[in-house]
Image (cartoon, rainbow, N blue to C red):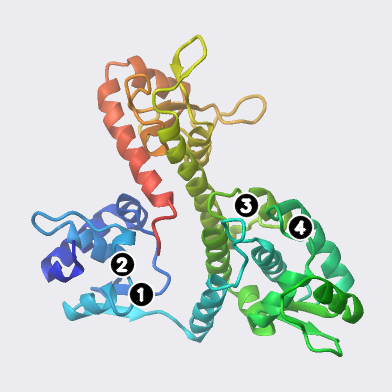
C-alpha cells in the first residue's frame, strides 16, 4: 500500500463518492475525521484531503483503501502528492492556527512521570480545568488559595495512584513548559522536582497564576482550538481511562451548541476506551461460559459502547417504530444485540453489535426479512464504529 500509486482518476472517483455520500457518511465509511488544516478544493467544493487520498487508494485496481494510521496527511505526504497530481490543496491555517499547532505540540510533549507504566495525570487535569475556565470566560489569574483549593480536590479525586494530590508540581511543570503564568513571587520558580523544596516555595510565595495570556485568549475565543486541545489531552494521556467524571466536574458536561465538535471528541474518546477494553476481553473471554446456563461471557463495556454510539436511538436505519420513545424512567427503549449471534461464534465487539428497539430486534431475530436486515445492521455497526474510533485521526 503506497500513496505513490495514486492517479488523478482514482482521486476524482473518490471525490465523486464523497459528493454522492456526503461528508459524514464518506468519513464514516473510511474511518477518517474532519480535516483540521488541509482541504482539497475541486470545482469550488471543499473536501477532507487525507480522507480523499485514503479512499482514492481503494479506487485503484487491485488495491484497498488506506486507513488513517497507514499514512500521514501532512504537507510532506498526502498534501504534497495530491498537489503533484494537479489538485489544489489549501492550508487553512491562519495565524491563530499556527499558534494552535505550537500549543498542541507543547501539550503532546509534556514531561510527565510514567513510573506506573502510564502517563501521570496531574498536568492534563490542570489543563482541562483551565480550558474549561477559558471557555466560560472566567478570570485567568487566580490567587494561590483558590487555585490550591480547586486543584487539590480535582487531583485527589481524579489523579492516578502515587500522584501527590497537590497542585505545586503540575503548576511548576506547566510554567516550565510555557503554558502557565505565575506572578507575585520574589524567588525564582523552582523546577518541578523533589518534594520538600517545591512545597516550601509555594507555601512561602503563594503565587497568583493561570494559563499563559496568549493561550487563554486563543482558547477563550476559538471553539476549534478548545476542541483540538481537549482532544489531544484525552487521546494522549487518558487512553483506557474514563475521563467522564473529571470532564463533568470541570464543566465539560454542559456543552452548548457552539461546542458540537468538542462534544463529539469527548464521546469518541469514551467510545474508543470502551472498545479497547472490549477487544481485550474478547481474547480473555473466548470459550468461557457463565454458570449453569453455559451462556457465553459477554462484555459489559461492549454493550455500553454500543449504547453510547446509538445516541439513544434505534440504529436500524429502516426503523418504523417510535425511536424517540423512552421508559417511564426516561431511558431509551433499546436492546443491544449481536448482529452475528454470540452463541454461534459471533464477535462480542461493538462493530458487530447494534442497539435496536424491541420491534426491530424481533424482526432481526425472527422476521421474514431478518437475514436482509442483518446485512444492513452489520454495515451500520461497522460504519459508525469506524467513525468514532480514536485510531481514526484528522
Q: CA distance from mark 2 to mark 4?
A: 38 Å
Q: Which mark is residue 300?
A: none
Q: Position of residue 122 (x, y in %)?
A: 69, 63
What is the quadrant of residue 135 in the picture? bottom right
- Is mark 4 in CB contact (under 8 Å) with mark 1? no
Location of mark 4 (residue) = 154
Q: Quadrant of the C terminus?
A: bottom left
- Within 10 Å of disc 2 (Cα), the crowding (few <14, some 14-19, many 20+) is many
Q: Secondary structure at mark 4?
A: helix
Q: CA distance from mark 1 to mark 3?
A: 30 Å
2 or 4: tag closer to the N-terminus: 2
Q: Position of residue 153 (x, y in %)?
A: 81, 57
Q: Which mark is residue 50?
A: 2
Disc 2 versus disc 4: nearer the observer: 4
Give the residue at x 12% y 59%.
60
- Within 10 Å of disc 4 (Cα), the crowding (few <14, some 14-19, many 20+) is many
Location of mark 3 (residue) = 243
Compared to residue 271, the image places residue 17 above or below, namely below
Residue placed furthest toward the right: 204
3 or 4: tag closer to the N-terminus: 4
Q: Position of residue 154 (x, y in %)?
A: 76, 57
3 or 2: tag closer to the N-terminus: 2
Disc 1 versus disc 3: nearer the observer: 3
Mark yes or no: residue 315 visible.
no
Q: Which mark is residue 38?
A: 1
Amino acid at each position: 500500500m503506497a500513496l505513490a500509486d495514486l492517479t488523478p482518476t482514482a482521486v476524482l472517483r473518490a471525490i465523486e463518492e464523497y459528493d454522492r455520500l456526503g461528508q459524514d457518511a464518506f468519513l464514516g465509511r473510511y474511518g477518517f475525521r474532519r480535516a483540521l488544516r488541509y482541504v482539497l478544493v475541486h470545482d469550488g467544493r471543499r473536501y477532507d484531503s487525507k480522507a480523499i487520498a485514503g479512499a482514492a487508494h481503494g479506487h485503484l485496481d487491485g488495491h484497498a483503501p488506506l486507513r488513517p494510521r497507514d499514512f500521514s496527511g501532512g504537507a510532506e505526504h498526502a498534501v504534497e502528492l495530491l498537489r503533484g497530481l494537479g489538485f489544489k490543496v489549501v492550508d487553512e491555517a491562519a495565524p491563530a492556527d499556527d499558534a494552535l499547532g505550537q500549543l498542541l505540540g507543547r501539550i503532546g510533549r509534556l514531561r510527565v512521570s510514567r513510573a506506573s507504566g502510564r502517563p501521570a495525570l496531574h498536568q492534563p487535569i490542570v489543563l482541562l480545568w483551565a480550558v474549561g475556565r477559558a471557555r466560560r470566560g472566567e478570570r485567568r489569574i487566580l490567587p494561590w488559595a483558590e487555585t490550591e483549593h480547586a486543584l487539590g480536590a480535582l487531583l485527589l479525586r481524579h489523579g492516578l495512584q502515587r500522584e501527590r494530590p497537590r497542585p505545586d508540581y503540575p503548576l511548576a511543570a506547566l510554567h516550565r513548559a510555557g503554558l502557565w503564568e505565575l506572578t507575585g513571587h520574589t524567588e525564582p520558580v523552582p523546577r518541578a522536582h523533589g518534594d520538600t523544596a517545591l512545597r516550601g516555595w509555594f507555601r512561602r510565595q503563594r503565587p497568583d497564576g493561570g494559563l499563559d495570556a496568549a493561550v487563554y485568549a486563543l482558547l477563550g475565543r476559538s471553539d476549534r482550538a478548545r476542541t483540538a486541545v481537549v482532544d489531544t489531552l484525552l487521546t494522549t494521556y487518558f487512553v483506557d481511562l474514563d475521563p467522564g467524571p473529571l470532564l463533568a466536574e470541570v464543566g465539560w458536561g454542559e456543552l452548548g451548541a457552539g461546542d458540537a465538535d468538542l462534544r463529539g471528541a469527548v464521546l469518541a474518546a469514551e467510545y474508543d476506551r470502551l472498545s479497547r477494553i472490549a477487544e481485550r476481553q474478547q481474547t480473555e473471554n473466548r470459550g468461557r461460559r457463565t454458570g449453569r446456563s453455559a451462556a457465553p461471557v459477554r462484555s459489559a463495556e461492549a454493550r455500553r459502547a454500543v449504547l453510547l454510539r446509538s445516541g439513544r436511538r434505534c440504529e436500524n436505519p429502516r426503523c418504523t417504530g417510535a425511536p424517540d420513545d423512552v421508559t417511564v424512567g426516561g431511558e431509551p427503549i433499546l436492546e443491544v444485540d449481536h448482529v452475528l449471534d454470540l452463541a454461534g461464534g459471533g464477535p462480542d465487539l461493538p462493530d458487530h453489535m447494534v442497539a435496536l428497539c424491541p420491534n426491530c430486534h424481533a424482526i432481526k431475530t425472527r422476521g421474514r426479512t431478518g437475514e436482509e436486515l442483518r446485512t444492513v445492521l452489520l454495515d451500520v455497526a461497522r460504519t459508525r464504529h469506524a467513525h468514532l474510533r480514536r485510531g481514526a485521526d484528522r
